[in-house]
Every structure is written in structure tokens, then in C-alpha cells.
Image: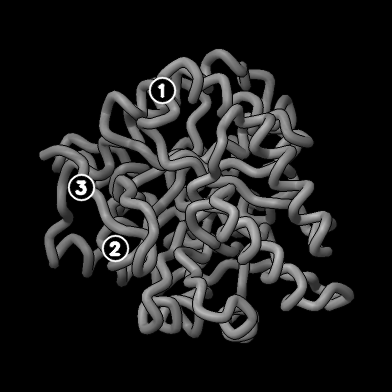
């Protein structure tokens, strides 16, 4: 079966049920195996397999990721992609949002951003959310952005943002979501489902824990994941039974644990995972996650294994 496509929000762009994230295109902090030209090829290979959503941010490598994505758009045809990016948490004042958008447009080499996201709400509330949303509405009216979106927003933030946008809809909320980190299911996911706001799931593979590549004796050495408590020995041991279930289901289907984990997210209505890919082979694996459907029995096995895990952050 080929990839399916869903609409983001009530009136946003139509995207593949799995996208590609490009935080890894920010540079060597993700490891010595990060090469710009390979990420460009990964984006191209994703497109060949039906993936049209590519997500980046001005924060990633101080704009470097956007430039890499821009190279891919130029090489493979801007018209073939739904381009999503995010503006930095230090650019929340009205004029700063407008300037940040222009800078992203330039780095991406595009005239319009399909999905422009506020990267995270101001934790100190120094800049009124109403001011930031006013800028996003202005950009939407000018046609510089097709759809307004947010990232890492709690329900109270979503409520305030929707009120400030005065009729302009929020297409999506990009939040962390995977089988080990399911906090959004308490409030954010039900709220977004009820109000027609799609979820873009970042870290859908828990930065690689759910791929089965890592264990207490084998952990990643890059700067980003060395700081992630998921890779502490106790948490990798806690996740092992779930990874074993993913592997068993995958082996029975000729799939990888990562593909099973991504398919579980794809099975959630209105949720689109955006896994990263450093090279074309990883892009192929990610796209392949949308080529099958887990059975009710398989989903139940995964659910039971996931619910039994307790991740410790202290």
C-alpha cells in the first residue's frame, strides 16, 4: 500500500501520514555521521516514497537546517513539499516575528511557508501571547505563511492563542510523543482532537531508544542524546521489554522495531510523526512505517508493554 495523506487541522495543507524532521541537519551535535548532502538525499528519497512534509526550525544550527532544507527544495522541487518551520523563543515580539519569518523565507529559498510554528510559549510570559499571535495573523493575511501553527503548547496556551488569533485557525501543535513519553494524552491530545488541531509528533522514536539499536552497554555518543535521561541505564532497562515486543511484531511482519513504533503513532487519529533521517536508508525505513496496519491484537500487545514502563527523570 502507498502512503496516505491527511489534512492538518480544519483547513491546513494535506500531508503524508509520516513526515521528516530535520533537527539533525543542525550539525555535528547529532554525531560525526551527519552530512548535509546525505540529509538532502534523505529528503529526496522521502519524497520519492510519498513523504511530502518536511519540518525544520530557525533554532536548528542557527538557521543551518533551514539552508539544508532549502537545498533539497531547490533540487527536488519546492512545489512537491509542505514546508514547516518554527521561529525561536527569543523572537516573540511583533516585529521580531515578522523579521524571523523573512529570514526563514530567505534561508529556505521560498516565497511562502506552509506551516509556520511558534517553537514554544514564553515560559516567563514577558511577551504577551496576543502580541505574537497578532504577528502570525499579519503574516497569514500577507500570504507569507499558509497556515498558523504552534509547538510545545499546553491547553491553556492553545486556548489563549486561539482567542488572540480571532478566527484564524491553528493547524497543528508540534509536541513530543512516543511510546515512552505519552504525557500529551492526558490533556493536550484530547483537546486538540476535539478542536480539530492536528498533532505533529517530534521524537516519535524517543531519539532512537525505540529502534532497538541501543542498550545499557551501547549508548549514543553525540552531544544531544548524551544529555537525554532516556539513555540512562535504568531507563534503557525499563524500555527493554517494550523494545522486545516491537522487535517480535516487526520480525513477524518483516519490519523493524522503529517501523512498528512509528506505525503505532500513525494509528492515532490526527497524529503525524516527524522522525529524523541522516541518510536515504533511514528515510526509507521511516516511510516504510506507513505501508502496513497493525492489528488490534498487535496494538494491544504494544499498549500493555508501553503502559507497564516507568521512565525516571530524577
- Label 3 and label 2: CA atoms lie apart by 23 Å
- Label 1 and label 2: CA atoms lie apart by 38 Å
Q: Residues within 10 Å of mark 1 (few under 14, many from 20)?
A: few
Residue holding disc 3: 4
Reading the chain from its start, which is encountered first: label 3 or label 2?
3
**Quadrant of the rendered image containing residue 264:** bottom left
Secondary element type, mark 2 = helix
Residue visible at 56% across and 36% down in the picture:
111
Secondary element type, mark 3 = loop
Residue holding disc 1: 77
Label placed on residue 302: 2
Residue visible at 39% across and 51% down in the picture:
243
Residue sticking out furthest to the front: 142
Q: Position of residue 314 (x, y in %)?
A: 74, 69
Disc 1 + disc 2, Cβ < 8 Å: no
Q: Nearer the viewer, mark 3 or mark 1?
A: 1
Amino acid at each position: 500500500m502507498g502512503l496516505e495523506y491527511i489534512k492538518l487541522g480544519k483547513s491546513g495543507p494535506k500531508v503524508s501520514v509520516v513526515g521528516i524532521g530535520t533537527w539533525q541537519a543542525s550539525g555535528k551535535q547529532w554525531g560525526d555521521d551527519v552530512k548535509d548532502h546525505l540529509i538532502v538525499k534523505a529528503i529526496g528519497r522521502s519524497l520519492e516514497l510519498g513523504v511530502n512534509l518536511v519540518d525544520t526550525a530557525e533554532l536548528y544550527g542557527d538557521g543551518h537546517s533551514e539552508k539544508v532544507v532549502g537545498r533539497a527544495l531547490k533540487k527536488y522541487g519546492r512545489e512537491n513539499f509542505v514546508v514547516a518551520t518554527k521561529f525561536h523563543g527569543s523572537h516573540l515580539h511583533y516585529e521580531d516575528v515578522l523579521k524571523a519569518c523573512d529570514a526563514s523565507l530567505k534561508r529556505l529559498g521560498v516565497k511562502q511557508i506552509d506551516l509556520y510554528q511558534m517553537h514554544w510559549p514564553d515560559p516567563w510570559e514577558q511577551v504577551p501571547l496576543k502580541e505574537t499571535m497578532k504577528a502570525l495573523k499579519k503574516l497569514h493575511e500577507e500570504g507569507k505563511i499558509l497556515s498558523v501553527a504552534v509547538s510545545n503548547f499546553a491547553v491553556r496556551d492553545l486556548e489563549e492563542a486561539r482567542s488572540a488569533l480571532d478566527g484564524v485557525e491553528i493547524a497543528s501543535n508540534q509536541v513530543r510523543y512516543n511510546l515512552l513519553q505519552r504525557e500529551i494524552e492526558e490533556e493536550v491530545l484530547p483537546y486538540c482532537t476535539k478542536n480539530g488541531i492536528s498533532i505533529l509528533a517530534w521524537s516519535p522514536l524517543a531519539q532512537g531508544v525505540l529502534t532497538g539499536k541501543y542498550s545499557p552497554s551501547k549508548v549514543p555518543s553525540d552531544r544531544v542524546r548524551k544529555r537525554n535521561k532516556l539513555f540512562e541505564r535504568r531507563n534503557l532497562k525499563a524500555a527493554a521489554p517494550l523494545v522486545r515486543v516491537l522487535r517480535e511484531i516487526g520480525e513477524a511482519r518483516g519490519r523493524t522495531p522503529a517501523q512498528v513504533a512509528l506505525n503505532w503513532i500513525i494509528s492515532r487519529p490526527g497524529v503525524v510523526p516527524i522522525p529524523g533521517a541522516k541518510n536515504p536508508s533511514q528515510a526509507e525505513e521511516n516511510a516504510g512505517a506507513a505501508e502496513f496496519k497493525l492489528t488490534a491484537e498487535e496494538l494491544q500487545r504494544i499498549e500493555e508493554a508501553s503502559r507497564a514502563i516507568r521512565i525516571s527523570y530524577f
